[in-house]
Image (spheres, helix red, strand yellow):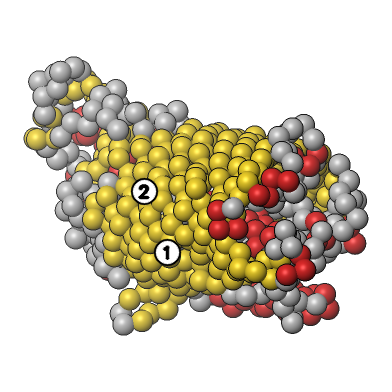
């Protein structure tokens, strides 16, 4: 019995270790009214720069930002580039020239989750480790060397029971190579919990995309949320 | 030179101006404290955002008076402020408006104006329309030229963005179509804007003030504007390049002293465009904390004067290269070189009064400005800038560029050094 407890403890420590490495990672969340489960990093950028107010599927979206801090910095680094100062200036230029509005900015992950949950079309970001309820966590795809390819068969990853029970979640980043016929040829884990990574790889290998003239690459961020 | 008949505001005296500047500055600090907490409210179940800014500058020059201020004595007649409200009515429809006011030496004189008032409907990301009084898209900064808090510099390069002539390009009463198109194969994003509308200059702006040096009293100045802008966010992260074109048909009307018979007094005066266009090319590169931008502008202006008895041809060319670096969260430095030339000829009856001025090597026909700036952000919403200008030339006409004979009655010195200190607050 003692040995089993010790083993569990060791397992938890091992499992958490890689999570710390990606502690600054973020996941993108959306209100339940948003139809898409997966959007591209380009779409995320367009939405947060107010270049787009809808996703490719036509859903209207409204960006919600978190105030400057590690989560906001990580989001800037991952999706927008530039600094918080540049982003503030960008929004003010829109506001003072009559071209756009200042997006909602909230103080914490909890506030962002609460706002996204109650606001139709809201799309925001929180730390990858934050447990979220009543919102959907979006899979983010980063197109590689080819045109955007539409996913036609998606298999959801099998969330390991032990991790789910222990509320261990987060995001896993994968690099895929997609063959001309649309099958996933290779999958490489770029970051995240290795056990969740294994589950994600097993699922993504079964995904099928639309055919293309050549082999393409894509980068995915897959969320694992123990509340869903 | 004939006497100035430019409208002088009764509140435009130096003491009143200083008081108004001080009051507006106090209001700005007060506003900053209050509105940072309350920038939006609900109206008919819609969120209305309220934003504003105010700036106060001080300029001192060692030689010529600049930008219609008495800068050789040091001048704080350098104030502007704006307030806007906007609301997203539906997913695709947004409305908003901004009021703006300024006092810059002899210009503006605290006569408020509607800066923009727009109804904007975005059908798709690649196609939207907006109508009303719309800020004109021309180059990198025309539509945001009043909001100096967006940039490192206190004054934009005057060769391309002359602050005394802001009315010429700032907005049009009409409509735009606009959109963004993502190019395939990760080739970046193309943004376009095309517009048509009516420009209406304030009689308190730079060009009517310039004409007042010839005894002209301009009653109206404006006309048709149409043009387009195309910009490409290239695959190289942070690099944007673009081009703008603006065509105008402008008419100015008023009264002027007859140059052929000054004793006759004021006679009707008119001038109108035969050809009036601007081409502007620009690029911007942002990498890390460094921002570099450069623009080239050519303004060709062929005007009929005095009802067609004479014609003026002005070829105004300007370019600049600017760099700015953010040293820390609160401190930025920047520098630019701004190059302005004007070449002018007059044909017809007035030709005898105005010999050709085509040698752009002469100080009267150019303004080369080397600038260094430091900016400190005291808070996220309040900054102070200190800027040095080292100018050669004064490009004083026939289309003005910062230097006016009325405030330099003793003539111009070829070189001017200027110190500009400016603080601005926004919310």
Mark 1: secondary structure: strand
When asked about the image quadrant of residue B220, the answer is: bottom right
Q: Is residue A5 visible?
A: no
Residue nearer the viewer, B260 or A115: B260
The residue lying at 30 percent from left, 33 percent from top is B183
Residue nearer the viewer, B69 or B209: B209
Residue B421 percent location from the top left of the image? 78, 57
The residue lying at 77 percent from left, 56 percent from top is B404
The residue lying at 17 percent from left, 48 percent from top is A57
Q: Is residue B62 visible?
A: yes
Badge 1 is on which residue?
B173
Say above or below: B309 vs A24.
Answer: below
Residue nearer the viewer, B148 or B340: B340
* Residue density around tag 1, few if under 14, some if 14–19, many if 20 or more, within 10 Å: many
Residue A71 percent location from the top left of the image? 46, 50
Check the picture and name the quadrant holding the N terminus of chain B.
Answer: bottom right
Residue nearer the viewer, A14 or B204: B204
Rounded to the nearest angstrom, the CA distance separating label 1 from label 2 is: 14 Å
Residue B413 percent location from the top left of the image? 88, 46
Q: Which mark is residue B194?
A: 2
């Amino acid at each position: 019995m003692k040995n089993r407890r010790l083993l569990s403890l060791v397992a938890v420590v091992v499992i958490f270790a890689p999570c710390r490495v990606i502690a600054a990672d973020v996941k993108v969340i959306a209100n339940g009214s948003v139809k898409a489960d997966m959007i591209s990093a380009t779409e995320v950028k367009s939405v947060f720069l107010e270049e787009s107010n809808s996703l490719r599927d036509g859903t209207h979206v409204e960006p919600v930002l978190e105030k400057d801090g590690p989560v906001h910095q990580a989001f800037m680094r991952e999706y927008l580039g530039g600094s918080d100062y540049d982003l503030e200036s960008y929004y003010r230029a829109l506001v003072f020239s009559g071209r756009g509005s200042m997006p909602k900015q909230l103080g914490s992950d909890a506030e962002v989750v609460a706002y996204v949950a109650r606001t139709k079309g809201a799309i925001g970001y929180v730390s990858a480790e934050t447990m979220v309820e009543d919102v959907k966590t979006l899979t983010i795809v980063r197109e590689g060397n080819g045109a955007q390819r539409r996913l036609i068969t998606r298999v959801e990853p099998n969330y390991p029971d032990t991790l789910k029970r222990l509320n261990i979640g987060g995001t896993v980043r994968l690099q895929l190579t997609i063959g001309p016929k649309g099958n996933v040829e290779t999958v490489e884990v770029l970051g995240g919990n290795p056990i969740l990574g294994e589950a994600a790889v097993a699922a993504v290998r079964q995904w099928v995309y639309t055919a293309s003239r050549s082999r393409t690459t894509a980068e995915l961020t897959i969320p694992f949320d123990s509340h869903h | 030179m004939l006497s100035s008949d430019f409208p002088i505001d009764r509140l435009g005296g130096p003491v009143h101006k200083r008081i108004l500047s001080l009051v507006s500055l106090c209001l700005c600090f007060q506003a900053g404290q209050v509105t940072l907490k309350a920038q939006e409210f609900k109206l008919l179940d819609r969120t209305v955002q309220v934003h504003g800014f105010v700036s106060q500058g001080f300029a001192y020059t060692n030689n010529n008076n600049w930008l219609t201020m008495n800068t050789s004595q040091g001048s704080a007649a350098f104030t502007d402020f704006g307030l806007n409200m906007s609301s997203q009515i539906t997913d695709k429809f947004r409305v908003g408006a901004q009021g703006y006011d300024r006092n810059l030496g002899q210009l503006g004189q605290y006569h408020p104006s509607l800066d923009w008032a727009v109804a904007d409907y975005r059908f798709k990301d690649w196609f939207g329309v907006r109508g009303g009084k719309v800020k004109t898209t021309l180059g990198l900064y025309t539509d945001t030229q009043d909001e100096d808090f967006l940039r490192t510099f206190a004054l934009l390069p005057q060769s391309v963005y002359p602050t005394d002539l802001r009315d010429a390009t700032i907005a049009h009463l009409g409509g735009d179509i606009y959109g963004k198109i993502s190019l395939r194969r990760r080739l970046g994003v193309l943004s376009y804007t095309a517009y048509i509308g009516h420009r209406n200059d304030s009689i308190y702006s730079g060009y009517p003030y310039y004409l007042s040096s010839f005894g002209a009293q301009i009653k109206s100045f404006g006309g048709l504007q149409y043009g387009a802008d195309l910009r490409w966010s290239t695959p190289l992260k942070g690099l944007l390049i673009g081009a703008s074109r603006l065509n105008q048909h402008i008419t100015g009307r008023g009264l002027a002293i007859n140059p052929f018979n000054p004793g006759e007094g004021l006679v009707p005066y008119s001038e109108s465009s035969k050809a009036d266009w601007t081409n502007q090319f620009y690029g911007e590169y942002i990498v890390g904390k460094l921002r570099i931008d450069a623009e080239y502008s050519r303004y060709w202006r062929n005007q009929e004067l005095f009802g067609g008895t004479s014609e003026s041809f002005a070829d105004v060319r300007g370019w600049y290269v600017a760099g700015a670096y953010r040293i820390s969260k609160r401190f930025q430095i920047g520098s630019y070189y701004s190059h302005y030339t004007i070449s002018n000829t007059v044909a017809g009856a007035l030709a005898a009064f105005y010999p050709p001025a085509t040698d752009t090597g002469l100080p009267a026909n150019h303004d080369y400005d080397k600038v260094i700036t430091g900016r400190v952000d005291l808070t996220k919403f309040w900054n102070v800038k200190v800027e040095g200008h080292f100018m050669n030339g004064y490009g004083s006409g026939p289309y003005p560029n910062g230097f006016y004979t009325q405030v330099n009655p003793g003539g111009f010195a070829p070189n001017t050094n200027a110190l500009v200190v400016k603080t601005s607050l926004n919310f």
